[in-house]
Amino acid sequence: MIRLITLLKRKPGTTHDEFLRHWFDVHGPLIANSSAANYVARYEQHPTAWPPAGSLVDEPEWDGVTIQEFESVESFWAHTAEADFPAMQEDIERFLDPNALQWTLTEEPNIVVDRP
């Protein structure tokens, strides 16, 4: 199993809540209903834990993380070649800062602790 892990930063001028609404209500369904999703074994959206209102702690650098699982590296690259993949890229520019995206493909993890 290959995992695509991506750190997400919202588009400048949008709030964290606006980012979340678009990510959950627009971008997630766009991915789920795409032909590119045929290559995706699992897609997870992990919003960043935000400090409470009025907190003296700065906003986190990232607004969320996605984890997508693919059967192989070839499956990952095949999903990017699907005809509707550009629509997902266009949507990214609506709510994310594309210059701030950080991503990596990972192999099976080396599990150090695994408590039930």
Image (tube, helix red, strand yellow):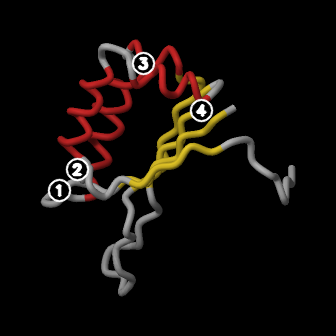
- Measure the C-alpha gap from mark 1 to mark 4: 28 Å
Q: What residue is drawn where x is 86% and y is 49%?
A: 116
Do the residues bearing badges 2 and 1 touch, measured as CB atoms within 8 Å? yes
Label 1 packing within 10 angstroms: few (<14), some (14-19), many (20+): few
Q: Which of marks 3 and 1 is nearer the N terminus?
A: 1
Q: Which of marks 2 and 3 is nearer the N terminus?
A: 2
Taking 98 as reference, is 22 above or below it? Answer: above
Q: Earlier in the sequence, mark 1 or mark 4?
A: 1
- Measure the C-alpha gap from mark 2 to mark 3: 25 Å
In the rendered image, which residue does mark 4 sit on? 69
Q: Nearer the viewer, residue 20 or 43?
A: 43
In the rendered image, which residue does mark 3 sit on? 36
Q: What residue is drawn where x is 41% and y is 72%?
A: 51
Q: Which of marks 3 and 4 is nearer the N terminus?
A: 3
Of marks 3 and 1, the one in the foreground: 3
In the rendered image, which residue does mark 2 sit on? 18
